[in-house]
Image: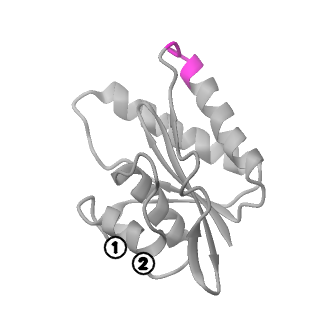
Amino acid sequence: MKILGIRNYSDGIRYAIIEKDDSGYKCLNLSNENRITKPKSCEGNDIYTWFRKEIERIIDNNKGFDGIAIKQNENTPSNYSKLKQVMFFDCITTMVASDKNIPISSFVYTNLRTSSKNVEQLAESNVGKTSKHWDTKIADAIVAAIKMTNAHV
């Protein structure tokens, strides 16, 4: 089973490609690209066009996903425009998955049986750490993808 874990944020995308087999979990992009940052020149509705193309590129370059798992943003920033943009990113991810006939699920920490304080340790204990940009966002993507495999994390 191959799952794409996504954690969108206002300035980009964190993603993990998790594969589960009889031996356990493996993050296929642990040492490769796992963070895509929004270009500084990208503003207005161009942000959403850029984002859709990046999600499609990830899916098209890594064929064979059995599902996509989104870890939703649970913070309510005082700046609604940042939260709104992340919600739109999650919606675009859902639409791309639908267009490509890939099942999609969305999770919050309660569903994942963890918290922002523990998610990095949980991700690391299952697949290890990314070689670059290790943080809560990539851990969120990893744990959401693991959860979608119907495993108990």
Amino acid at circle 1: Arg
Amino acid at circle 2: Val
| Separation (CA) of disc 2 from disc 1 | 7 Å
Disc 1 crowd rating (10 Å Cα; few below 14, some 14-19, many 20+) is few
Residue drawn where x is 43% and y is 30% of the image: 11
The x and y percentages for residue 3 are 63, 63
Tell me the number on the disc at residue 82. Answer: none
The x and y percentages for residue 150 are 55, 78
Majority secondary structure of the magenta segment?
loop
Instruction: Say above or below: 147 vs 98.
Output: below
SS label for mark 1: loop
Circle 2 sits on which residue? 153
Give the side of residue 141 with respect to residue 79, left or right: right
Residue drawn where x is 65% and y is 62% of the image: 67
Give the side of residue 122 with respect to residue 31, left or right: left
Instruction: Say above or below: 43 vs 83.
Output: above
Is residue 65 part of the magenta span, yes or no? Answer: no
SS label for mark 2: loop
Pointer 2 and pointer 1: residues touching (CB < 8 Å)? yes
Picture mark count: 2
Label 2 or label 1, whichever comes before in sequence order: 1
Residue 107 image-quadrant placement: bottom left
Q: Mark 2 against mark 1, which lies toward the viewer?
A: 2
Q: Nearer the viewer, residue 81 or 23?
A: 23
Q: Quadrant of the N terminus?
A: bottom right
The x and y percentages for residue 121 are 32, 68
Residue drawn where x is 42% and y is 78% of the image: 153
Residue 56 image-quadrant placement: top right
Residue 143 image-quadrant placement: bottom left
Circle 1 sits on which residue? 113
User: What is the magenta range?
Assistant: 41-47
